[in-house]
Amino acid sequence: MATGDLMSKARAGDGDAFRALVQPFRAELQVHCYRMLGSLQDAEDALQDTLLAAWQGIGGFEQRASMRTWLYRIATNRCLNARRSASRRQAKEWNVPHVEPPEPTRLGEVIWLQPYPDTLLQAVTDAQLGPDARYEQTESISLAFVTALQVLPPRQLAVLVLRDVLGFHADEVATMLDSTLDSVNSALKRARAALQRRWPPAADRQPPAPGSASEDAIVAKFVHAWESADIDALVDLLTSDVFVSMPPVPFEYEGKGLAARFCNGIFRAGRRFDLVPTRANGQPAFGAYLRAPSGISHGTGLYVLTLADDHISAMTRFDSSVLPWFGLPRSLPSR
């Protein structure tokens, strides 16, 4: 059915016609909300609010902008409202039994962060980007980038994502945010400067291409070292300034020495793990399952690796509650 016909039917209250109009944008809108909020759960809530508001407001949509731009306007403002009104979640205490973590390098500012399954990204790899987009799609969904975004003031965050990630023109962004062109340009300048400080480009360190032989080789070495609790082999894979974090626990560790102490604590008392591969945020990831005498391995968390050349430059641990998002079970037979 032609878009004009669908629009007429949607304005007349046809829910199926409305769903047909918005379905092509649903996946990319969810990713947009995730960048804004850093949480898959919050992104899904914001997406549902966006679609409800669009359904209720379809009669007033005058088509001065495209359907996609109109939906992004609604989604962005719903995310801004969420960031302003929601009390940020509290940090959680370390709760791994019989494991005492070392003193952290620092306590992280961004404690409410969740991984984004690559299976949900497949539908948006060809999403339309404007000519002003500065970042590759894979780069703009990485954990490091999304983490850096969360520290920006809400309005600066919105402007940077709309301009530099999605490539909307400055005048479009001004309309979306009910702002002026000067205000948008000023916010973008400040946001770029802040992002540069927290997420400087690493031209001398490039991650291997997803699914490449180079990536496979690093991943295989990591799996062998982790499953065999070989600390020396694991440390050899790390960059000198490797960064370990574990939201919503605020502990952060920087450098090989502290990373080794953290991992050694995880393996203490004969704890051994099975790893199940998956992908999150365009990066290699693994469900970690603690082996038990019963012959059943129980899920303890999800690890996401950031690769740099042929080493691991960051490792992010999430708790086991995220495993079902990746199609991973809570437990499985030990190998």
Image (cartoon, grey):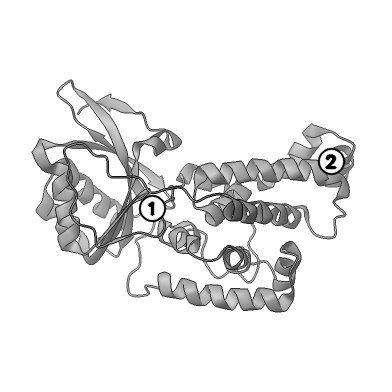
**The N terminus, quarter of image:** top right
Q: How many marks?
A: 2
* Distance between mark 1 and mark 2 Cα atoms: 38 Å
Image quadrant in which you'd find residue 6: top right
Of residues 283 and 218, the one drawn nearer to the viewer in this rendering: 283
Quick check: 108 above or below 48? below
Identity, as a three-letter code, of the amino acid under mark 1? Gln
Which of the two labelled residues, at mark 1 and mark 2, occupies the earlier sequence position? 2
Residue under pointer 1: 283
Residue under pointer 2: 6
The 10 Å Cα crowd at callout 2, few under 14, some 14 to 19, many 20 or more, is some
Secondary structure of the residue carrying tag 1 is strand
Of residues 215 and 119, the one drawn nearer to the viewer in this rendering: 119
Indicate left or right for 63 with 181 as reference. Answer: right
Residue 211 coordinates in the image, percent (x, y): 37, 51
Quick check: 207 above or below 1? below
**The C terminus, quarter of image:** top left
Residue at horizontal 67%, vertical 66%? Answer: 168
Residue at horizontal 34%, vertical 41%? Answer: 319
Image quadrant in which you'd find residue 191: bottom right
Identity, as a three-letter code, of the amino acid under mark 2? Leu
The 10 Å Cα crowd at callout 1, few under 14, some 14 to 19, many 20 or more, is many
Residue 82 coordinates in the image, percent (x, y): 60, 51
Indicate left or right for 287 with 18 as reference. Answer: left
Residue at horizontal 30%, vertical 33%? Answer: 299
Image quadrant in which you'd find residue 307: bottom left
Q: Is residue 200 visible?
A: no
Of residues 25 and 40, the one drawn nearer to the viewer in this rendering: 40
The extreme top residue here reads 294
Residue at horizontal 61%, vertical 74%? Answer: 187
Residue 85 coordinates in the image, percent (x, y): 60, 51
Residue 175 coordinates in the image, percent (x, y): 76, 66
